[in-house]
Image (cartoon, grey):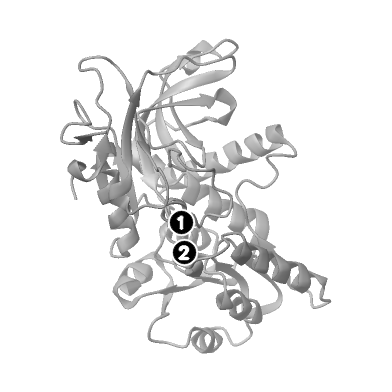
Amino acid sequence: MGTAGIAGAAGTAGSAQLVEIVLPGVVEPEGLRIRRREIPAPGPGQIVVRMEATGVSFAEQQMRRARYYDQPPFPFVPGYDLVGTVLTAGEGVAPELIGKRVASLVKVGGWATHVVLDAADAVEVPAGVGAAEAETLVVNGITAWQMLHRRARVREGGTILVHGANGGVGTVLVQLARAAGLRVIGTASARHHDALRELGATPVDYRAEDVPARVRELAPGGVDAVFDHLGGRSVVDSWRLLAPGGTLVAYGSATTRDDSGSKQLPVLKILGRVWLWNALPNGRRAYFFNVWAGRALNKDRFRARLGADLTQVFRALQRGEVSARIAARLPLTRAAEALRLAESGTVAGKVVLIPDSGDGATGASAQ
């Protein structure tokens, strides 16, 4: 699917403008729209970042179906994270930040050529790390790092189970866990097993095998942590696979992506189970991980923690402990094709969107 699959608004030829992809409602990927407008000026404490790479995460797949539990009302610009260069800065921002490559977690708004951010939400990308490589590790890396090191805290030599170990978060989680000296069991379809073995994980085929039974064979005493993005029945099975003192970290409800009805209910069910399990005197723990937790209560603490953790992920990349897995790089105006590819389940790594060369809306129909 090329750019002709997205409807666009005509812009002024030759003038620098902001180009963004709009999700207008519950639509197929081809229903995304291109919108052009003037590049805004940064306010006090803000910066304008010229996007170099943004990505397609599972959140966007849920959002286009109105299934992401706290997404904004339609229409809006998707894009959970981005990497780019600081173009301009507002009052109160250190001028030396201009020209720096930074990364930011934004939840929405990243699918645009220019993004206005609070300067405090930008994390500097180390020299020598490319924009697309860094992009693969923003939301995926932060999620994996914080779940592993701030929630599970499994001791060296322990065993963990990672569901969807071939996915964006799962792949990073496997690599970080191996670097921490942990044994990893990872679920994935058979075509991804060789890649998981190369990362040092023991694969389990969730399509052809009884996952709980197979995990019990591999870890008769239970596992020290389970990382579960599936939700539903899987969360119950994951809890039962824990060893004494083990930790369950649930962080999504992927199995309900195509369901109808309330988008909050699957998450509320997980939260209810977590509350109940933690009330039991059995020594095990359960969490529902939300990367945004704590921001509303203490924004400064949230930013400091996120910046420190993302910096650790980038250092792991530089040390070779984590690899940047890019499934494809597509121009921003081919966001429909990128979303289709990410949803296909046929690729390993992250689908990355990059700026178009020249007039990005060429070939798009007029709105």
Report which residue position mark 2 lands on: 257
120 and 145: which is toward the camera = 120
Instruction: Give me the residue at 55% from left, 13% from top.
Output: 94
Determine if residue 153 is in view: no
The relative height of residue 286 versus residue 215 in the rendered view (above or below) is above
Instruction: Give me the residue at 68% from left, 40% from top.
Output: 295
Among numbered discs 1 and 2, the one appearing first in the sequence: 1
72 and 323: which is toward the camera = 72
Q: Is residue 302 left or right of residue 354?
A: right
Q: Are marks 1 and 2 in contact (CB under 8 Å)?
A: yes
For the residues labelled 1 and 2, the Cα–Cα distance comes to 6 Å
Q: Amino acid at mark 1?
A: Gln
Instruction: Give me the residue at 60% from left, 74% from top.
Output: 235
Q: Is residue 288 left or right of residue 39?
A: right
Expressed as whole percent of the image width and height from the top left, the position of residue 248 reads 65, 69
Residue 62, numbered label: 1
Q: Is residue 200 left or right of residue 34?
A: right
The relative height of residue 274 versus residue 77 in the rendered view (above or below) is below
Q: Is residue 249 left or right of residue 135?
A: right
Expressed as whole percent of the image width and height from the top left, the position of residue 114 reads 39, 26
Give the secondary structure at mark 1.
helix
Expressed as whole percent of the image width and height from the top left, the position of residue 281 reads 84, 76
Residue reaching furthest to the left: 363
Task: Tell me where residue 115 sits by quadrant.
Answer: top left
Expressed as whole percent of the image width and height from the top left, the position of residue 177 reads 52, 61
Give the secondary structure at mark 2.
loop
The relative height of residue 217 versus residue 310 in the rendered view (above or below) is below
- Counting labels gives 2
29 and 323: which is toward the camera = 29
Residue 93, numbered label: none
Determine if residue 308 is in view: yes
Q: Amino acid at mark 2?
A: Arg
